[in-house]
Amino acid sequence: MRFGIRTLDDFGDIRGKTVLCRIDINQPVDRATGKLKSINRIQACAPTIRELSEKGARVVLMAHQGSDIEYKNYYTTAPHAKVLSELLGFEVKWIDDVCGPAARDAIRELEDGDVLLLDNVRFMAEEQTLFETKLCLTHEQQAQTQVVQKLAPLGDLYVCDAFAAAHRDQPTLCGFEQILPSAMGRLFEKEYCTVSALMEEPKRPCVFVLGGAKIADAFQMMRTVLSKGSADRVLTGGLVANIFLASQNVEIGKGSLDFIMKSNYGQFIDVAKDLYSSYGDRITLPVDLAWVENGVRREAGIGEIPKDIGAVDIGGQTAAMYRQTILDARTVFVNGPAGVFEQEPSELGTKEIWRALADTEAFTVLGGGDSITATEKYGLTDRIGYICTGGGALIRFLSGEELPVVKALRHGSRI
Ligand code: 3PG
C-alpha cells in the first residue's frame, strides 16, 4: 500500500483472474490517416499491461479517446490496439464494443495472459465529461451505471493506471472501486507518488511556469499555490499572460483581446486582476510580446504594442528574464507553452524556456499534452526531471484537491 492505495504487489497471485484495467491512452489522432500522432501515453502504461499479462491475468483494458469539452473529437481505440501490440510484442485483441454482448463474450473467451482493449468508453454517454459536470453522480451512483453493472460481474480485480484522467469523476474511473478489490497500476503509482512527494516539501525557490490555453485550470491552480505559499514565483506566458496584462489595462492588441473574448475567457480578466492585487509581488508578467506580420516575427515592449496585433508569443527580453529565473530555481513546475510553438516565428519563448529547463539544476516537472509535444519537438525528453502524462490531473493535484480517482482507489483498496 502507498498513500492508502494498493499497488500491484498487494494483489498476490492473479493467474487466471480477470483484471479490468482503466488506462489513459488519449492521444492526438490524425483523422485523415487514422493514425496516432504521438504514442507517449501508450508507451507509459505498457509496463503495467505487460506485468499483468506476464503474471497470467486476463486483462481487459478500458480507455477514452477524445474530449467532449474542447474538441468533439471522439475516435475509436482501434489504432491504439495496434500500437500496443507492437510495443508489447504480442497481439492485443480489440473489439468495437464497450459493454454490450459482444464485448462481454470477448471477455469470457479470454485465456490467461490475453489482453483485450475495449472501444472508446466515451461512446457511452454516461462516461462523458458533460454528463459528469451536469449530473455529478456519487461514486456509489457511478457503480450503478450500465458500464459498471455490465462489466464488473466479469472481473475479479480492478486496476487504474490512468493518472492523466485522475481528475475525472466518471464510472470507468471511480465506479468499479465500489465493487471490486482495486489497486493502482505502475504508472499511476509512479506519477502519484512522485508529485505527492515533491509537493510535500518542494526545494526553494519553487517556480511555476504557466502558459498555454487551458485557462480555468491554470487560474485555479495559481490561486492555491500562491495562497498556500508553494510557489515562490509564477512566470506567465501564452494566454495566461495576455489575460493578466489585459487585467492591468495594458495594450495587448485587438487580435489578442478578441481571442480572449471569443474563447469565453473574458471572465478571467477580473480573476487575474484580483490575483494580481493579492500576489502581484510573486507573479511575473512579460515585459515584451511578439506577433507575426506577413510571416515575419515582430516584437515590442509593453507600452509600445500596436493596437491591432494578435500576440502569439512572449518577447525575447521576457524569454531571457524567464530563463534566468529558471536557472536560479531549485524546483520548477511547467504547464503550457509560452506561445504558438508549433510555428517557427512564434516559438522563441517556448524554445528558450524549454532550453532553460534542460540547463537548470532545479528539479523540473512538466505535464500536459502541449508541454510534452514541445519537449519532444526540442529533443529534451531525457533532460526533464519528471514528465507527467497528465495535464489537467497534475494541475488539479497541485491545486490541492483530492483527485476523485485517488479517493475511489482508497475505497477500493479496502475491499
Ligand atoms: C487528458 O488528455 O488530459 C486526459 O486524457 C483527460 O482528458 P479529458 O480532459 O478529455 O477528460
Image: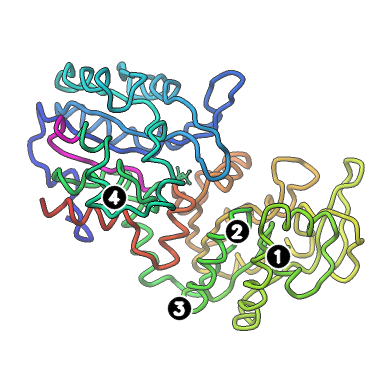
- Asked whether mark 2 and ligand 1 are closer than 8 Å, the reply comes as no
- In the rendered image, the quadrant that contains the N terminus is bottom left
Judged by depth in the image, the label closer to the viewer, 2 or 3, is 2
Secondary structure beneath dot 1 equals helix
Q: Earlier in the sequence, mark 3 or mark 1?
A: 3
Magenta extent: 152-163
Helix, strand or loop under label 3:
loop
Q: Which residue is mark 4?
A: 189
Q: Which dot marks residue 215?
A: 2
The kind of residue tagged 3 is: Lys
- Marks 3 and 4, Cα distance to the nearest angstrom? 25 Å
- Label 4 element class: helix
Mark positioned earlier in the residue sequence (4 or 2): 4
Q: Is residue 411 above or below residue 221?
A: above
Residue 248, image quadrant: bottom right
Q: Which residue is mark 3?
A: 228
Contact? badges 1 and 2 (CB < 8 Å): yes
Tag shown at residue 243: 1
Q: Residue at x 22, y 52 (%)?
A: 140
